[in-house]
Image: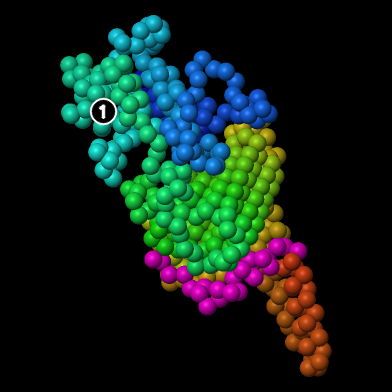
Amino acid sequence: MDDLNLQNCEPKQLSFYKLSVDTLQFLLFLYIQQLNKLSLRTSLIGEEWPGPRSRPQSPSLTERPSCHNKNWNDYSHQAFVCDHLLDLLELLLEPEQLTASFHSTHSSVVSREAVLALSFLIEGTVSRTRKVYPLHELALWQPLHADSGFSKISKTFSFYKLEAWLRACLTANPFGPSACLKSGKKLAWAHQVEGATKRAKIACNTHVAPRLHRMVVMSQVYKQTLAKSSDTLVGAHIRAHCCNESFIYLLSPLRSVTIEKCRNTTFVLGPVETALHLQDCENLKVIAVCHRLSISSTTACTFHVMTPSRPLILSGNQNVTFAPFHTHYPMLEDHMARTGLATVPNYWDNPMVVCREGSDTRVFRLLPPSEFYIFIIPFEMEGDTAEIPGGLPSAYQKVLAQRERKIQIWQKTVKEARLTKEQRKQFQVFVENKFYEWLINTGHRQQLDSLVPHAAASKQEPG
């Protein structure tokens, strides 16, 4: 099949429609969305609706992770693919073969383009080597032709042999979140309150995984301030799950970031090369430069972002706030260059609502300049970035300048008041008390208190 290519759209639509997508891959993408289908019956009585095929158990019940989130359960992914492998292959048949395939799969053939599309979902290794190959390369490898059913004459694959080969060889992703939590290396953090929580699980697989499969998993971090800038994070896929009332700084160039089921937490991220996705989160503040941002089922979350693509608001979001990127750290511009991200274009203020409820822009707002404040990253690092890359929009910069003038006027007033030593002391106590009340009311006291014991170790060295 040909790629979808909508080049004949109006000029004002080209920014969205000029890209193309492989049709077969798109069909597979739509089909695997069923992995996350919610069943009311399942949620109420703990069992699934009966289906035409019974769902197989995980490869090993002893290996089934305790987390029931399907996005994190690599064994659920494997079970889904194994259970629906026949359907997936039938989606890739030529239209004239489709009717016949329901009666006999033994005579059907699968095109090379179809197997290439399957590489979107499946990849593998030879003899358990670390090098990972896409599926089509393995299927076309000469020693595996007999197993994969490839014919040099017709340049196609036998449907029957291909299905049997895939079913016999499929295993759970050895570089996925489940494997990372089970056998990954535990991470050490420069800023972490020891003993604050014993249930937090933080691990990485960077010591065993190929470059494109490096992952860092953070689960159930509670009332912590965590900060890291190191080679462990560089180019890694970050998965954060069930973090609550925490401040998390990941100040390195990242490959992708997924944040799920997190509450009342601030994430400060280094540049994200591909996608930053949030799902089922509440009251988060996310600060990042990213290639793409998408959000689903979030409530009262604020995004201070710089992004060259329009943020995608998917279904189920409420009270979303977008604001300009408002911080920096010394290595930020170097990290942006490393991930191919620049300051322009920047579509932080032009999100796209893509949801079943329709294009109702009331699900989001742009942060009013009167509510805008600069965010200071409280760590020292080596580097040349000394200001926010690209600066701030004029309306926000104007508000900051007005506040600065008010502070100067206030300082001048205090200086000219000619207070006595005792009056200055009383005034200082009054200001400190008001500041302390503000810290408590805004929740910033927790972050400051968690940093105090580690003040001597606040210098972050990449390593």
Q: Residues within 10 Å of mark 1 (few under 14, many from 20)?
A: many
* Residue at screen point 39% across, 66% down: 463
Q: Residue at x 78, y 93 (%)?
A: 421
58 vs 337: above or below: above
Q: Main secondary structure of the magenta part?
A: helix
Residue 230, position as x, y percentages in the image: 42, 62
Q: How is the image coloured?
A: rainbow
Q: Is residue 108 left or right of residue 13?
A: left
Residue matched to label 1 = 139
Tell me where the magenta segment starts and ends, as one range.
Answer: 441-463
**Amino acid bearing label 1:** Ala
In front: 12, or 176? 176
Judge left or right: residue 281 versus residue 258: right
Residue 458 within the segment the image draws in magenta: yes
Which residue is drawn at the image coordinates 64% and 43% (left, top)?
Answer: 298
Quadrant of the snapshot with the N terminus: top left
> Residue at the spot x=48%, y=50% of the render?
217
Residue 273 drawn at (x, y percent):
43, 49
Q: Is residue 308 visible?
A: no
